[in-house]
Image: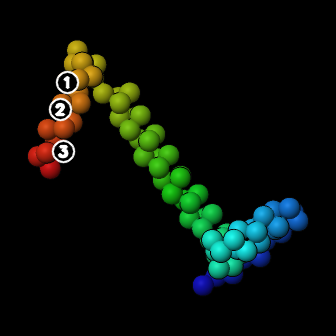
Amino acid sequence: MAQMNISIPDKLKSWAEQRVAEGRYSSTSDYVRDLVRRDQEAEEAMRRLQAAIDDGLASEETDATIEDIIAEAKQRRAGA
């Protein structure tokens, strides 16, 4: 496993140590790893959302109602 040394203000260090003291994390390193993982997950979710928005903007217009669209999505899920 690679190592990384960081410098943070005392208040942030205390915050991380408080999380460890609460028992949520085994160490401050564990806490920081979790923060990085969550940031990665959030970035991936944002990429998926942006891709869906881009797909929607690139799609053709339709006269379908929202009810029609929901029914079609339910049919696709049932068939999958």
Query: Which disc, if any, is residue 72?
Result: 2
Rounded to the nearest angstrom, the CA distance separating label 1 from label 3 is: 14 Å
Query: Which disc, if any, is residue 22?
Result: none
Residue 8 seen in the current view: no
Q: Which residue is rendered at x = 82% and y = 67% of the image?
A: 14
**Residue that lies at the very extreme toward the bottom in this rendered image:** 1
Q: Is residue 36 above or below residue 51?
A: below
* Label 2: element kind: helix
* Label 1: element kind: helix
Rounded to the nearest angstrom, the CA distance separating label 2 from label 3 is: 9 Å
**Residue that lies at the very extreme toward the top in this rendered image:** 63
Query: Which disc, if any, is residue 77?
Result: 3
Q: How far across and down, in percent of the image, does residue 40 sit?
A: 54, 59
Q: Which residue is rendered at x = 21% and y = 36% of the image?
A: 73
Mark 1–mark 3 CB contact (< 8 Å): no
Crowd class of label 1 (few under 14; some 14 to 19; many from 20; radius 10 Å): few
In the image shown, does 38 or 53 lie closer to the viewer? 38
Q: How far across and down, in percent of the image, does residue 65 sit?
A: 24, 18
Rounded to the nearest angstrom, the CA distance separating label 1 from label 2 is: 6 Å
